[in-house]
Amino acid sequence: MRRVLLASALAFLAACGQQQEEAPPAAEEIVMRVPPPWFICDGINEPVVLVFNRNGENVQVAEYEKPSGAIVQRNGYYTAEEGAAGSIMFDLWRDAGPGGNIRQINPGVLETPGSAYTPVFVSTELDRRDINCRWMPRTRVLGFTGRRSFVVHEDASGDLIYTAYNFADVDAARPIELSENGRTTTPFSVEVRDGAEAQTPEGVTYTFETQGFRYVVQLNRDGTGTLDVSRDGVAMQTEELIGYQQGTAQAQVEQPAQ
């Protein structure tokens, strides 16, 4: 099985490399250069960010540590899905035997089922480590750079909120529960409300402003992105996104085409 996982990983990397070498298509035809992750688990009880990718029964997990933001390991598993009361369990296996599991909650059991803009992955056990995942109702974006993780989500009235969690504060981070089954940590480094969304042929941009500070999350259609911070019009820093996942309101998904 190790050879099968290795072969799958090499084929995936080769395909990505070939796609990067090709000339980009027209803006309206751009596809993700790197497929979006199955999900991201931003650990709230462990100083890690885990990026899960899935191809059928094969699961690859990239682990990034806090506070450095560096990748520390990549592991391959194969999975089997099993239903449970109100949730789905994904058992993870390696050549040597059980490697852990993933727990996903059925949106129907949430306080507000329609708040599940992203799949509700709440925890994972990897090689005997129990890791709880950050999850916010009505999440538009969950992403991370080498210095912080962040969430762009809506409140119940539709107001866009940007919240960032600096990796440098990981020693002080404490898990907390919020309304509507939210799970996150305190302290956060920044929280800004009343954001604006702009859709363009190149991607989507979220902009938040407060007291002279401007935070811009740019998500490109090729799978890349940036987090830009400026003050009084002067650029302070630009951080490349290492990974991100996007969410969509179920009402928007189910709305018939006009």
Image (tube, rainbow, N blue to C red):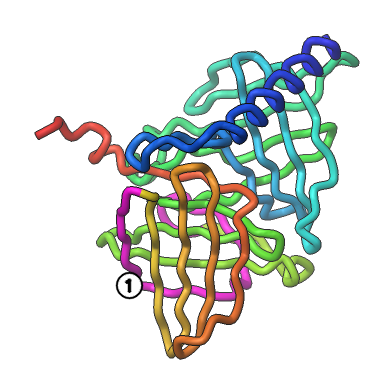
What is the residue that sits farthest to the front in this orientation?
23
Extent of the magenta region: 178-201
Relative side of 204 to 225, left or right: left
Find residue 84 and report its horizontal and vertical position in percent.
54, 20
Q: Is residue 197 magenta?
A: yes
Rendered residue at 77%/24% (across/down): 76
Q: Residue at x 72, y 65 (%)?
A: 167
The part of the image, by quadrant, that contains residue 90 is top right
Q: Position of residue 190 (x, y in %)?
A: 54, 75
| Amino acid type indicated by mark 1 | Asp
Q: Which residue is depicted at the point 62% across and 56% down? A: 144
Query: Where is the N terminus found, in terms of image quarters?
Result: top right
**Could you tell me which residue is drawn at 39 percent across and 63 percent down?**
206
User: Relative to 195, does residue 108 appear above or below in the rendering?
Assistant: above
Is 255 inside the magenta-drawn segment? no
| Left or right for 81, reference 45 | left
Q: Which residue is mark 1?
A: 194
Q: Is residue 110 above or below residue 153?
A: above
Residue 233 image offset from top left, x and y in percent: 45, 86
Furthest residue to the right?
96
Q: Quadrant of residue 83?
A: top right
Assign a secondary structure to mark 1: loop
Residue 168 percent location from the top left of the image: 75, 71
Residue in front for this viewpoint, 244 or 19: 19
Q: Nearer the viewer, residue 116 or 178?
A: 116
